[in-house]
Amino acid sequence: MTIDPITLAVFVPLFGAIAAFVFPRAAVWLGLGAVLATCATVLGLAREVLAAGEVVTPLGGWAPPLGISLRADGLSVAMLGMSAIVGLLVSFGALDALRDLRQRQYFWPLWLLLLTGMNGVYLSTDIFNLYVMIEVIALAAVGLTVLSGTKDAVRAGLEYMYASILGALLFLMGVGFVYLQLGRLDFAGLIAAEPSGALSAALALMVIGLLLKTALFPLHFWLPAAHANATAPASALLSGLVVKAALYIFLRLTTYMPLPDEILVTLIGALGAGAVLWGGVQALRAERLKLLVAWSTVTQIGLIFLAFARAGQVGLTESWKAAALLILAHGVAKSAMFLAAGRIKDEVGHDRIADLDKSDIRPTLAQFTFALAAISLIGLPPSLGFIGKWSLMEGAMAAGYWHWVAVTMIGTLMSVAYFSRVFAGFLRFDRMRGELAEHKGWALADIAPLTLAVAAISLGLMAAPILSFIELGYPFGELP
Amino acid sequence: MTPDLIYGATGIAVFAIGLIGALCAQDRLRRVLALKLCSVGAGFILVVGAWRIPPADPDPVPHALVITGIVVMVSATAVALALIRRLHTLEAEDDD
């Protein structure tokens, strides 16, 4: 058996997780090494995909429908690349952010297990494999949520666990129905299948499960508490990467098994609009910085579904690209923002938004990072978030769906408003009691979030190559 | 009614009972049990997919899937129970 990058992309983090668990004293170095090695394999895979358009490997030489094969194309490598690079920088951030020995020991195995699950999702070609991988992600993600060990975190983690398992079981039920109908579970079988009522019911079950896992309004109830109460690196991973796995499966499934009705596409868009508005209102009301950032995740997920629905059923062949751009933009910017929020909380000692301007410690670098990430999330040019929103609105306008444009505009205004609450806290100096210490609150740990935030802005300048890369291998065309 | 219909309907019913429990139950342990019921229901559906009119042999693939599903659910239950215990301890400490 030859070892190729596509197999390594799943097994390197898996073996890294096991090694980091077995040798807890060396967990940090084993973990960092495994993440670096994963980055290298993803790079190798990207080169293969650039050359060939797509890479397919039947594991153990068994071909589908009986065997499991892994497939990489432009979109999956883009997702892999996002996970690997964001993951690497969050790992560097975690070196400083996790001071407790127990947290340090358990963070690495859990995070590598999470990476295994996500890489598995992005390379899978059959829906049962996807079910197993989303459960792996769920277990690792819940572990990361409760890592801080506080009561609020454990309570939020348990809620997350219930939502996550229920989502996965709904997905499994859908998988069962597909098997009853088709007798096979691979993507090629799904594409070849004739549309029928029973298959639509199966798709509906799977989609509801995925919406629960990705926290689309009104199934978002578990997200804010879980993401706000986790430790900063865990929040960055959960918000930036974990919800994207379910989103990615949603994009794939709805293309292989097209939504049978225009009304359903509109419904998805309406739920997205609900998320944008409701999340915006809650972010305006949030009292704590991390909670505000978590609610902003709810709105951004809504925005991604708006992008999916922007041009109705006929536009789906193009709309997924707008959704994918927003997924990448949010992954990079939100992880930067959560790390920066964690740094601000560390330096100032609390994260109450109303009291941020009373502190004489101003972690200016972390605040600058937060602002840069906000620029991408609000969607100001030239950030990647801007390109995503631009293509969302462009498609909606071309299709004459002005209501989606209006919702996006309102959502953008709201995001300016709620981030401005934080900026006002950063920039007001007249409510301070003590002297302002120059350059206090700078640390080496600011480098990782700052790099991510700068990437979120500057990737917008590379939008054209990114767009042509995710189209490689015709992600939503025929399978071989 | 053929056996596969009976089993299929039972599977859907069990799943539905579990779903209602998972959404409506207040007690933490009850919700875990409700989720277990959901997984049993989904497993039923897969097993029905394996059934063939005797004397034909059943399809082995769904059996493999169900076993995988059971393993996944066992680990998920273990994590959920551990979290519930932990939360219980934390809340008991607060009461003291």
Image: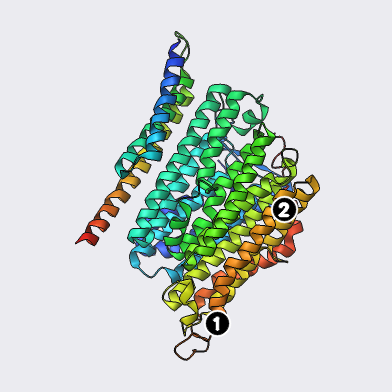
Is A249 positioned to the left or the right of A47 in the image? left
Discs 1, 2 touching: Cβ within 8 Å: no
Is A309 positioned to the left or the right of B52 in the image? right
The quarter holding residue A374 reads bottom right
Viewport quadrant of the N terminus of chain A: top right
Is A259 positioned to the left or the right of B76 in the image? right
Q: Which residue is mark 1?
A: A428
Q: Which residue is mark 2?
A: A405
Q: Residues within 10 Å of mark 2 (few under 14, many from 20)?
A: many
Q: Is residue B22 above or below residue A379?
A: above
Q: Residue at x 37, y 43 (%)?
A: B76
Mark 1 / mark 2, whichever is N-terminal: 2
Q: Residue at x 48, y 77 (%)?
A: A356
Q: Position of residue B25 (x, y in %)?
A: 35, 40
Q: Position of residue A244 (x, y in %)?
A: 57, 51
Q: Secondary structure at mark 2?
A: helix
Amino acid bearing label 2: Val
In the displayed orientation, state which residue is furthest to the top: B55
Viewport quadrant of the C terminus of chain A: top right
